[in-house]
Structure formats: C-alpha cells, structure tokens
Image (cartoon, grey):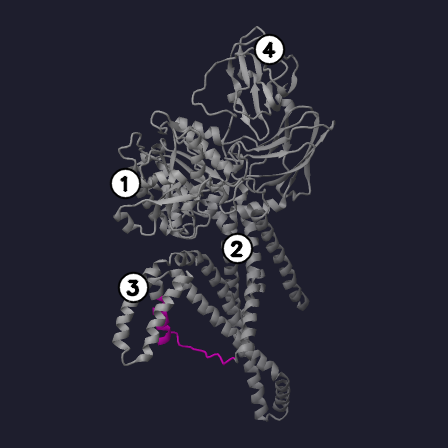
Amino acid sequence: MGRAGRRLPAVAALFYAALAALVLLGVRDVLFLYEENRCSMTYMYEYPEYLKIKLPKKTVRRYPAYELYLYGEGNYAEANKNLILTGIPVLFLPGNAGSYKQVRSLGSIALRKAEDVDFKYHFNFFSVNFNEELVALYGGSLQRQTKFVHECIKVILELYRDREFAPTSVAIIGHSMGGLVARALLTLKNFRPELINLLITQATPHVAPVMPLDKYLTDFYTAVNNHWILKAQDLRNLTTLSVAGGFRDYQVRSGLTFLPRLSQHDSALSVVSSAVPRAWASTDHLSIVWCKELILAMIRAFFDLIDENTRQITEDPKKRMSVLNHHFVRHPAKMFEESPDAFTELTGAFTWIKVKTSKWTYSVYNDSNGKYFTFPLASHRKSYSHIYCQNSMLDTSSWIYGCINSNSSMCLEATDLSWRAELLPTVKVVILKLQDYPSLSHVVIYVQPAVGNKFTLDCEFFKEDSRTVWLPVTPLFSFGLSSRKILLNSTGLLYNVQLQHFDHIYQAFKIYIESHCHLLKERKPSVYRLHIPWSHEDSVTVAKVPSFTEISAKLHVAQPGNDSSVPVLNIYSSSDCQYEIILKTSLLQILGQIIRFHGCSLPVYVVANILLTYGGQLSTLISTGQCSEFSLELVRSAKPYKVDPVISIVVFLLGFNWFREIWDSLSLPEVDAAVLSSQDAWFPLVSLILFLFGAGIAYWSGVFFSSSLRLFSSLWLTLIRPSVLQKDNELITPRRVCVVVSLALVSWTTCGAFTIFIIYLRYVFKVIKLHVSVRAEQNTLNGDSEHSKETSQNAIKHTVKKQSSVDGTSEATQFLCNNRTIAEDVSTLRMHVTMLNLFTWIVLLNLPSLIYWLKNLSKLLRMAAKVPLPLSVAMLAFGRTHLYKVPHFVTFSLLLHVLCCIV
C-alpha cells in the first residue's frame, strides 16, 4: 500500500506532464508553424499627413476621446487643407488597439493609382481615431464607437455638399473590430442604410468574439448578428466583403471572419487571403492592413467600382459583386468589363495553323509574327470530354477564342473564351467542358507577336475520368503511422486528386508531392492548389520541377451539412514528369486545430478540474478531518465522466420539443455544447480531450502555486523573523468593516476588476503568512524532536508503571497537541492554496477589464490638473499652524502625476 501510494504521484506527474506537453505542442503549431510571410511592404512616396477634421461641438463633448482625420501626401495633402474635396469618400475604422494611421497603405496606393489616370477619379481616405481602445478585451465602448462613426459619416458627407458629383454614401474599410463596428451601424435606430453602399472588413471576427470576456461584448455580437439575419432583406443594397488572414493570423482564426450565409442575402462575400488572386499569401493580424498584394487588389476593385456617370461608387449591387468576384475570387487575367462583347472579330494578317493532335505545345521567343492556331472539336468530342489550355504570358490581353459553326480554316468572328480563364501564379489556364459548348466548332489560340518576350502555350484534350484520382484520407487516429500513396505516371498537364472524407475542422494532414522528370531540361514550375469547394479558402503552392514539396491540409470552415462536394488537390503539372503523392495524418496539426478552435475555452476546463478537486478536498475534510493534497485529490476527483455525461444528456433532451419548451419557459440560456456539437459531430470527443488538457494544466498550476509559496515563505523566513500567527475567531470586526467599505468605494469609483485584484493581492499575502507560520512551527517542532521523543517515551513508561511523573506526561501531551495543531494548519494551508488557485483564474478572467481601465486612465490627467486648486485651499486652511501637514498635500498631488506618467 505504501509503495503504491508513493508510485501514484510519480505516474500521475508523468501523465499530466504528457498532457501539458500536448497542449504546448498545439500552441506551438498555432503560434509558430505556419508559412513564411509572402507579403510585400507598402511604402509612401511622400511624407504622410493626417488632417484633423473639425467636428460639431456637440459631438466633441459627447465623444472627447475620438477624432476624425483625412489622409494625404505632398501636394495632394496641401491642396486638401481647405477641405474642398471632389473625390470619393472612404472611411477606415481601426480595430482593437489600432491606430488611425493604419490607413496610410490604402491611401498611398490609391493616390498613386489616381495619378495613373490623371486624377479623373480619386478617393479621399478618412480615418477614425478611437484612441487605441482595447475593445476586444472589453465591449463597453463598442456602442459608443458605433455612434461616433455615424456622426463621422454625416460630417464627411457634409464636406461634399454642393459639389458637382456629391456622394450620397460612404464606403467603409474596417480592420478587426472596426469591421464589426461598421456592421453595427445598421442596428442604430436613426441610421439610414443607404449611407453605406460598400463594406470591406479585414480580419474581422464576425461570427463570435475571439474571447467572450464580458457580457457587453457578447450582447453586442448578438444584437449585430441577429439584426443582419432578421433584416437581411434591407441589406441587399449593401455589398460586404470579408477578408481573412489565413493560418498566419493566430489572433483571429479565419473561420470567425466568414459572414453568415443567407439565401436571401447574396451580396456578401467571404474569402481567405491565401485564395485571393495575385496575392495567394496568408497574412497575420496586422500585416493584412499593409500587405501590398492585398491592398493592390482592393484599390483595383475600388477603381473598377466607379460609375462614370456619377463619378462615385456604383449603386448597382450586381456590378459591385461582379467586381469583387473578379478581384478576390476568380481573376481571368483580363481587365474588368461589366458587359464584355459577345463576339470578337479576329483581325490582322496573321498565319492560320490547324492543329489535329490531342496534345500541343508551342514556345515563343522574339517572334514578330502573330499566329492563330485552330483546334477542330468535331474530331475530339467522341474521345474526350474536356480541353485544357495554359499560357505563361501573364498579360491582360485575350488569347483563346471559340468559333461557332465554322467549316473553313479561318474564323473571322468568335466568342472570347479568355473570360473563362483563371489566373495562377505562373500561368493562366482555361478548362472547357466540350458538352457545355455544343455550338463551338473550333477553339482558336491567338499567339501575339512577342518581340523580346518568351512564353509557352500548351493545350490538350482529355477525358475527365483519366485525370481524376480518388484519394481517401487517412483516419484521424492513425497519428501519422499509416499513409495513402498514389503515383501519377501520365504525361498530362492537369490532375485532380479528390480528397475523400476530408470535411472536419479537426482533421489535418501532411501531403508530400515528389516530382521526377525523364529529361533534364528547363521546365516551368508546377502549381499545386488545395481547393475547398464550400468556402473561398484555397491555398496555392508553387514548386520547382523536379522537387519535393510539403503541403499542409486543414480547414478553416467545416463542410456544411447540405454540401456533398469534395476538397480537391489540383496539380498543374509539367509534361513528361512523374508525381508521387503521399498523404499522412499530422498529429501536431490536429493538436493545433484543437487549440486554434477551442484554445480560448481551455480556462473553463481548467477551472472545472480545480473545482472538482476543491469539492473532493472538502469531502475529505468532512470525512477524515484532514484536507488531502491538491495533486492526489485531482487524480481521485477530477474525472470527465462526472461532467460530460450530464451535459450530453441535456443536449440530447434539448432535441425534443417538450424539453425545449420547459427549458425556454425557465429562461435558461442556450447550452454551449449543443451549439458546438451542431457545428461538428466530433466535438464530444474533442471536449473529452480538452477536459484532459485542462486536468494537465490544473495539475501543474497546483505545482506552480505550491512551489511559489514555498519560495516566498523561504525568502520571508530568511529576511524577516516570523511572528506567531494570531487566530481571529471574530467574523466581523471594525477593521474588516472598514476594509469592506473601502473596497466597495474603490469598486464603485474605479473598476470592479481593480478591486478584485487588490483583494487577490491581499489574499496572496495572507496565504504566504500562513505558509510561513506553518513552516516556522514545523521547524520549531523538528528542532526539539529528539528531546520531545525521549520525554514522551519516559512519560509513557512512568504512566504505565507508576502512574506518576506529571511533568513528563504534560510534556508528552504538549508534544501531541503541537503535532495536532500543525496538522490542522497544514490542512488549512492546503485548502487555501486550492482556493488561491481558483481565485487566480477569477483574476485572470477579469484582467482584460483591468487592462482596459488602466489604458483609459488618461482621464486621470485631467483630474490631476484640477486637484492642485482644492489642495492649495485645504493646505492654507489646515497647514498654517501645522507645517507637518504640508508634505501630505504635496505628496498626494505628485502621486497622481506619477500615476498618469506610468499609465
């Protein structure tokens, strides 16, 4: 029994150490293991200037901490100082702790673009200064920010009054929480929806807060999302684009940025930056506002959105969505045209060449003569289902056409199939299903004169079945020990690898692609695209040939229940090359996905484990009179089967209408587990894993607290001679009443979290003193142990034989009483350590509110400026005959000043 008791803590420590290591591996995957930064920095050509816009006095009084600025550079900024504006207004809203100066990347590139068109059109970029408020930590300011933005919109539109092309609406770009504030404008009672026609959000968590730290934040989200669902019909004239940062953005996971899908609301688009054409790069939470590739896509879209008649952003929602799809979803490598011509004349004295083969390659270098290559379709329709063409010339001119019912070798009028093309990093490609074009007789490839240019064109006919490979993914619990392998031996240019059963957010795989080529010659790079059909979260990888490439496959959004599509790995390959594809489950990335999606819920599981342990300690105290150690009680009491089955039963019963009616009649809130289980069927298992992770963290937090208290008590014993701890049996004393009243006053006048923090520090001090007292008593007892043992033995002998020697007996009794007192103190200390552990989590969960309050203590400076006057009066009133009081008044004023400087 003794050996088993000693072995149990060691085994438990190893088990909980393994759990903590798994948590750390998951955190490491989220925070550090992602693709390198592929974004280019944006630079200003001239010094940026921010012109402060004068606001109405009423607005300034109501929102003294907020400001509105107009961005400018050089001569443009100088010309705008008189606020005679003729451009198109765009308002930038910074996010959590964001600066109004983050608008400079957008404003600078838009200014350069306007210079390219000789300022025929240009944009005026405004930016709001929210005083860098931490609204992601505390939601109490979100409503105030929303109302201020409404006032800013009215001021901006007023600046354009009586202009020739005066705008009636404002486009808004919101970063992070700024995007949510923009959406919240529509919830204001006196806000007119027509004041906004375009909203672009950057890394904005639309679905839910990243960390639901306070009720203000969750209520704000509920109000905004409910309004957008219930009032979807009123939002048809508002076009919304949400851009997520991908896996590099560990602050806001991309799944939270996807706008709700509503059948009646088709003017919203959500994309991940890794899928945006001409960017194809993941961004972190801050670089998304300066990533040159993304900013260029936005500015190009803005200029394509301009209506030539009104010289403002078009009022046509369909055109707005067409432009956004053109620049953010599928780019055909052509300049945007709202209504491209149905037919195009193929003019020019160029050579016409007929191609009869099913596979064709043509390289161009310094060719001054243009050519037309015609591919008759009649001879290929029976043998093949598709035609695939690719062009390495990445200009925006048309290059592929379709002839309608042409029997001659030439085609003077054709439909432009270049609009069916798609731009990739190294080529632009077209895939045509022959069955969809029954009227086409020929496909024509136009090779333009290439003086000084070198490019290659390839075309091939193929059957879809021959280029589609089905690859079932490895099981979730294979842990990378098993793999799936396929070999592509064909000489084709395109392969589609269907990843079967890849539809859950907790799945994560490593895909290894090794290319081998028969001939050593210069080849264009291969392009690998992981296409997720139910959301715009594709990732694109460019690899040299031959090469060995590793691709991570994981999801931002799980497959919807009504969607049966399958993720596809598109391989745009080089001819005469062999591709070996190996797929393995990645345990490290699975842990990363669990932390990415539920890491913010870990405190709930940690506190649940500590509470179960606390309950077990109380039960042990009642039954034995002694409080058990935290680690041993954690092993005994913190069991997932005590918690999860109850929640599962409640979630199951909520599926019945009668139970749901009872639940709602009692005004009980929605069960979080029911929502999470409806989003992914694997959540109950993940919840069990999270409970174990919480147990590991709780165990090591207990070890940390015990070690910290031991360290502090050792320092105390070394530096200060301990005094006997006085036990106060009175519950209510005048001193305690004063402390309670003082803390209540501090909470009312400052911040509740600040009061909790003060109480916590006081409690830590009390526990340290208790620990010091117990150690001092133990040291005293250990110092006299030899003498006490001899005295007790002699006393017992005398009691048995002679029933005398009262002195020895009294010493033995005193020794036993001391042991009993120390045991009681140790038991009390163990209970206090567990309570301190729980209290620490209360402080941690309230810490964001405290940080927000400290950040906004700038108001204290105003108070510090007003304090010297009453202090001077008080000093003259009470210090003329009591000079020793003068330093107190001065010290109070200086302390306020020091506190302002620290904050």
- Which disc, if any, is residue 456? none
The amino acid marked with disc number 4 is: Trp
**Is any atom of residue 430 visible in this view?**
yes
Q: Secondary structure at mark 2?
A: helix
Quadrant occupied by the C terminus: bottom left
The amino acid marked with disc number 3 is: Lys
Q: Are marks 4 and 1 in contact (CB under 8 Å)?
A: no
Mark nearer the viewer, 3 or 1: 3
Q: Could you tell me how many numbered marks the image carries?
A: 4
Look at 52% across and 12% down and name the residue there.
Answer: 346
Q: Where is mark 2, residue-wise?
A: 642
Stretch in magenta: 722-744
Q: Where is mark 3, residue-wise?
A: 866
Q: Position of residue 603 (x, y in %)?
A: 50, 55
Q: Are marks 3 and 4 in contact (CB under 8 Å)?
A: no
Q: Secondary structure at mark 3?
A: helix
Q: Where is mark 4, residue-wise?
A: 352
The amino acid marked with disc number 1 is: Asn
